[in-house]
Image (tube, helix red, strand yellow):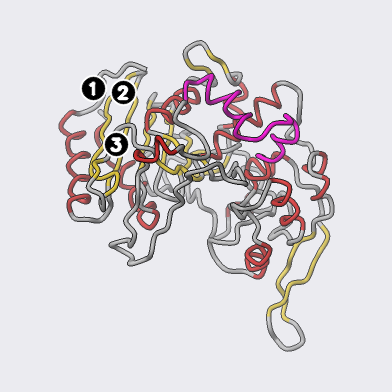
Amino acid sequence: MVYSGLSKGFSARRLEMLTARMQADIDAGRIPGAAMLIAHRGCVAYEQALGWQDAAAGIPLALDSIFRIYSMTKPIVSVAVMMLAEEGKLLISDPISRYLPELRNLQVGVERLDATGRPALALEPTRQAITLQDLLRHTSGFTYGIFGESLVKAAYREARVGSPKATSDEFVRALAQVPLAYQPGTTWEYSHSTDVLGVILERISGKPLDEFLDERILKPLGMHETGFWVEPQRQHRMAQAFSIDPVSGAEVKLPQLAQRPAFLSGGGGMVSTLRDYLRFAQMLQNEGELDGVRLLARKTMRFMTSDHLAHLPAATAGASYLPGPGYGFGLGFAVRTDSGCAIAPGSLGDYTWSGLAGTYFWIDPEEDLLAIFMMQAPEQRNHYRQLFRNLVYAALE
């Protein structure tokens, strides 16, 4: 990747507007800081680190600041799964019980009123097996214990599904104790699905998830700042959130990840830097290859970035469908399926995902463009994802 400073096709004046707009919000105390990068036609057109890495300590944000990327871990794990598919070590049509027999007899929780008129969970058998494809596209029936309320989500919280203190085997055993939220293959629901994929990678490879990803993806791509924890000698580069969000008033607690966690969350456990994640995103944009290192075949990348929900129209109908209007979902990414409908500009076929603390990226093959936004302000993530995308496309000539 060439660091050109400005690519033909972008307005220098409008990129300055992007900087000014973000700096104004930082100066107003709405967010601590933001690191932003736009790459276009093989060149970095824009790269800025604005504001504070740690506002309380007065440490400025830098281009090598380390961010908790949360669910931007999911595309990395999804790529790893498809690498094993290319090697014939799995099929995405395989039932997950082939690798995790503990999850062979899951049932679906259906809320009904009991004799007293109160909601209660009834259990129904699954009509079809959960497959690896269901995990990759979030149609497994699993959920999270957060993002809304239901009796199934309450059961997840009670069972402590996804506890950072659990091992991978303990995570699977906890998941086996709770019902599914939906019938497999019917409904898109954001969930622990990619955490399950992480455990499957461990079972197939015989290696811990961090070791497997380091060997197969991170080291080959030169992503030396990406992992599941931050050693003491690098802790001073961790980006921090405000302790109280200045807009919502909510308390913000982010993990410091100062030591290797017991549970390596394939769905949301990693940290990275702006330029490290650029290496991964550029590999995706190049359809599986970067600097002579090929992780995936061109056709596999196109398969992953195609909509896998098109024949499941009911899957996108719920209020909890996070990709939103104009987007389907592929194998690890939301995929744009409509020129209109979405809340921000883009192109047919652009693909994207984001992280809980405020990180976000997308790739637009039609425009030969990728963009990455990193901050640590969970309460403001939705606003700045949309704002950043609007301003990037506004600067494109």
Instruction: Measure the alpha-carbon separation of dots 3 and 2.
Output: 13 Å
- SS category of the residue bearing label 3: helix
In this rendering, the answer to whether 52 lies above or below 290 is below
Q: Earlier in the sequence, mark 3 or mark 1?
A: 1
Q: Residue 269's x, y, as percent?
A: 53, 44
Q: Earlier in the sequence, mark 3 or mark 2?
A: 2
Q: Residue at x 66, y 62 (%)?
A: 156
- Magenta-drawn stretch contains 66: no
Residue bounds of the magenta highlight: 198-223
Q: Are marks 2 and 1 in contact (CB under 8 Å)?
A: yes
Dominant SS type (magenta): helix
Q: Residue 365's x, y, as percent?
A: 44, 26
Pointer 2 local density, CA inside 10 Å: few below 14, some 14–19, many at least 20 = many
Q: Earlier in the sequence, mark 2 or mark 1?
A: 1
From the image, which quarter does the N terminus lie in?
Answer: top left
The residue beneath circle 3 is 392
- SS category of the residue bearing label 1: loop
- Magenta-drawn stretch contains 207: yes
Front position in the image: 372 or 276: 276
- SS category of the residue bearing label 2: strand
Task: Give, as a three-letter code, the residue at label 1.
Answer: Gly
In this rendering, the answer to whether 152 lies above or below 52 is below
User: Between tags 3 and 1, which lies in front?
Assistant: 1
Task: Give, as a three-letter code, the residue at label 2.
Answer: Val
The residue beneath circle 2 is 44
Where residue 5 is drawn, which disc sits there? 1
